[in-house]
Amino acid sequence: MIGRALALAGGLTGAVGASQFPEFSQQYMQRLGGTVDELARQIDRYEADAEAVDMTLAEYLRQLGAEGSLAQTQAGNMAEDIARHDRLADALATLEGAGPFMRARLASHMGDREIAERAFEVFKPAVPATFEGAVFAGTGFLAGWLGLSLIFGFLARLWATLRAPFRPRRTTRRGYR
């Protein structure tokens, strides 16, 4: 009885948790788009600086890196910004046309820790009133309920197996088995 109640609680917890995914993924994508836009603006500025001295951006970074430790640090930071922009722009392009179900399948493209933390800071859980929220809630309920049911079933069998050698043997009226 307690196991069933706990499994139900696990199912409800899974339902509430999973139903929040569509909204969180939407907020993540908004933050992702803002970050990509800001990095693109910085890269445009880097390219303008390189163009001002008649160099490509790659040549400019190479030249800047050869000038000393301070300039090397700046060139390294610029290269990291460019690499991050490329990585996040690819993730945004992949996620942009995807609906909530496809975003769940493509969740690996939502792996930027800084963006996820910033999205989570402002995220406010709510009861979803959409079809997608209901499907995610149902899936979360099943996963939570099934997961805890399996764990409790396994523990009950393990307990019965470990306890079996210690049970007294039943005898008939005459004292024989």
Image (cartoon, grey):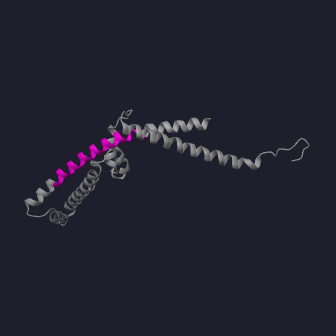
Q: Tell me where residue 126 sits by quadrant.
A: top left
Work out which residue is located at the far right of the displayed protein and give it: 174
Magenta span: predominant SS is helix
Question: In the image, residue 8 lies at what x, y percent?
Answer: 54, 36
Q: Kindly tell me whether residue 148 is visible in this rendering.
A: yes
Q: Is residue 10 left or right of residue 46?
A: right
Residue 41 or residue 127, whichever sits in front: 127
From what the image shows, is residue 13 above or below residue 86?
above
Q: Is residue 124 left or right of residue 177?
A: left
Is 30 a magenta residue? yes
Task: State the extent of the magenta-drawn residues as a range.
Answer: 18-43
The residue located at (87%, 43%) in the rendering is: 172
Question: In the image, residue 138 lies at what x, y percent?
Answer: 45, 39
The residue located at (58%, 46%) in the rendering is: 151
How many numbered marks, from 0 up?
Answer: 0
Question: In the image, residue 79 lies at what x, y percent?
Answer: 23, 59
The residue located at (34%, 37%) in the rendering is: 123
The residue located at (20%, 64%) in the rendering is: 65
